[in-house]
Amino acid sequence: MSASKVSFAKALNTALADAMETSREVVVFGEDVGTLGGVFRITDGLTARFGRERCFDTPLAESGIIGTAVGMAMNGMRPVAEMQFDAFAYPAFEQVASHVAKMHNRTRGRLTMPMVIRIPYGGGVGGVEHHCDSSESYYAHTPGLKVFTPASVRDAYVMLREAIDSPDPVVFFEPKRLYWSTAQLDLDELRSQYENGSLPRREGHAVVAREGTDATLISYGPSVPVCLAAAEDAAKEGMAVEVVDLGSVVPYDDETVAASVRKTGRAVVVAESQGFASVASEIVARTQERCFHSLAAPVLRVTGFDIPYPSPSFEHHHIPSSERILDALDDLQWED
C-alpha cells in the first residue's frame, strides 16, 4: 500500500464502488450516470463492473428519480440517486421535503429512509444559472435530512461511505470546482480503516483544518480551500487564523466551532451561498449565542450576494475570495 495522487472525483467514484461491493442493497441511478458515467464521470465504470441493474440511467424527471428512491428505501435497498446539477433538483424538492424527510417520523420508526441524494453544486466552473446554485440551506432547513458537503479528497471518500451507510436520508453536496483537485492518498489504506471502524467519524464532527490563535474562519464545501488560502495570506501579515471545516452541515458540530471561537475571540463565516436566511446566518447566530462572552467583535459573514447566480464573466465577484475574507478579518475591531 502506498499513497498516490488521487482526485476528488476518483475518491467519490471509489467510495461508490466500495459501497456497492460491500452490499448488494446499494444501487446507483440518475441522469446519464450509467453509460456515460455521469457528466463529471463520478460513476464511470460502475455499470460495467456491477451491471445495469445496479447502476443505470433514468428519464429526465427528477421527481421520478427521488420517488423511485423512496420506494426502494422503503423496501430495504440503499439507493444513491444523482441530481445532475444543483438547480435541477428543485423539481424533486416536494418529494424530498414531504416524503424523504418525513417517512421515518410518519411511520413512528417502522420505516427508515437509508438513501443518498448526490447533488453536484456551487460555482467556479464557468456555468450559468441552474448549473451553479448553492442550495444547501433549503435542505438544512428541512427536519429529517442530513446534509454533508466534503471539502477534501479524503473526506470525499469517507463522508460518501458514511452517507451510504447511514440509516437516515443524506443530501450529499459535491462541490463541482473541487472535482479536479488532488491530494496524496492511499485509498487502499483508507478503505481498510473505514471498514474496520478505526477512522474518526465525520458525521456531526467538524475538524480544525488549520490551527490559529487570532481569528476563526468557519466554512464548508467549496469555500474551505478559499479559507485556507486566506489564512495563508493572513499569515504573511502576521495573523494566525484558524480554519474550521464543518463537512457535516446537519448534524452540526457546535462543540468544535465554539471551542475554536472561544480560543480566538473572533470569527468569520464563509460560504458560497447567498447570505440572507442561510446556513451561514444560522452559524453566526449559534456562534454568538454560545460564545458571546468570549467574543472581541461581532461574528461576520463573507458569502455570495443575494442575487441569482451571475454569468460566468462575473462569478469571480460573486464567489467569496481570499481578498474579501481578508477584508472581513480587518473589520474585526482590532483596535481597543
Image (spheres, rainbow, N blue to C red):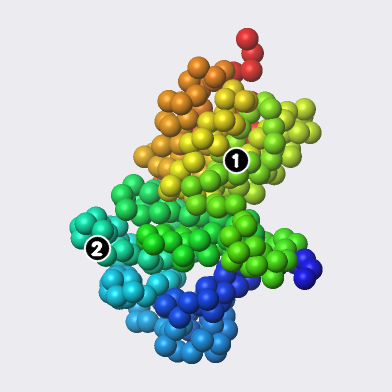
Q: Which mark is residue 110?
A: 2
Residue wearing tag 1: 244
User: Is residue 8 something one can see in this rendering?
Assistant: no
Find numbered disc 2 in the image and state the secondary structure of the residue it sits on: loop
Where is residue 8 shown, x and y percent of the image?
63, 64
- Measured as percent of width and height from the top left, residue 251 is found at 43, 47
Q: Identify whether 140 is placed above or below 286.
A: below
Q: Could you tell me which secondary element the residue under label 1 belongs to?
A: strand
Could one spot residue 241 in this view of the protein? yes
- Using the image, determine if residue 4 lies above or below residue 46: above
Q: Position of residue 139 (x, y in %)?
A: 36, 53
Which residue lies at the image location 59% right of the left edge and 66% below the top edge?
Answer: 195
Could you say which is closer to the camera, residue 107 or residue 310?
107
Q: Amino acid at mark 2?
A: Arg
Marks counted in the figure total 2
Q: Residue furthest top?
A: 336
